[in-house]
Image (tube, rainbow, N blue to C red):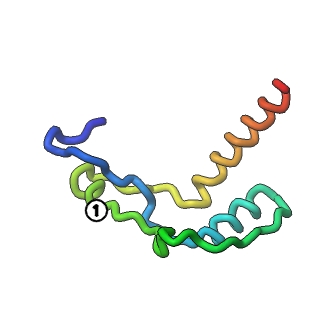
Amino acid sequence: MNSPDALTGPVNLGNPGEFSMIELAEKVRDLTGSCSEFIYKPLPKDDPKQRQPDIRLAREALKWEPNITLDEGLKPTIAYFDQLLARIGRDT
C-alpha cells in the first residue's frame, strides 16, 4: 500500500522459515489438541520440493520482513477458525 511508485508486480510476503507440510500438520494437530491421523498420498508431479519464499524484494523495496513465528501466528489463526466454526454451528 505504501510501496514506492516504481515497484510493480507481486512481492512475496511469506515467511522464509522453511518447514515441511508434515511439520506444519503436526504443529496444527498439537496446538488444537486433535488426535487426527495423517493420510499420505503421492505428491503431484509439479509439487515444489522446497517451500521457502524469496522475500528479498520485500526486504529491499519495502524494508519489510516477518516478525511473527509460525507458532505465534498459528495460535490466533486457530482461534479465528474455532470462532468461525462455532458460529456456523449455531447458524445451522
Q: Quadrant where the N terminus lies?
A: top left
Q: For the residue marked with disc 1, what is the amino acid?
A: Arg
**Kind of element beneath mark 1:** helix
Q: In the rendered view, does 18 fall on the left or right side of 72? A: left
Question: Which residue of the protein is positioned furthest toward the front in this rendering?
Answer: 45
Q: Quadrant of residue 42?
A: bottom right
Badge 1: how crowded within 10 Å, few (<14), some, or many (20+)?
some
Question: Which residue of the protein is positioned furthest toward the left in this rendering?
Answer: 6
10, 4: nearer the viewer: 10
Rendered position, 88 above or below 14: above
Q: In the rendered view, does 4 fall on the left or right side of 70? A: left
* Residue that appears at 56% across and 69% down: 44
On the image, the x and y values in percent for residue 77 come to 63, 47
* Residue that appears at 50% across and 55% down: 68
Rendered position, 26 above or below 79: below
Q: Mark 1 points at which residue?
A: 56
On the image, the x and y values in percent for residue 65 come to 37, 56
On the image, the x and y values in percent for residue 5 come to 16, 38
Q: In which quarter of the image is residue 34?
A: bottom right
Q: How many marks?
A: 1
Q: In the rendered view, does 53 fall on the left or right side of 2? A: right
On the image, the x and y values in percent for residue 11 come to 31, 51
Q: Quadrant where the C terminus lies?
A: top right
Q: In the rendered view, does 14 fall on the left or right side of 10? A: right
Question: Which residue of the protein is positioned furthest toward the top in this rendering?
Answer: 91
* Residue that appears at 72% across and 35% down: 84
Rendered position, 50 above or below 2: below
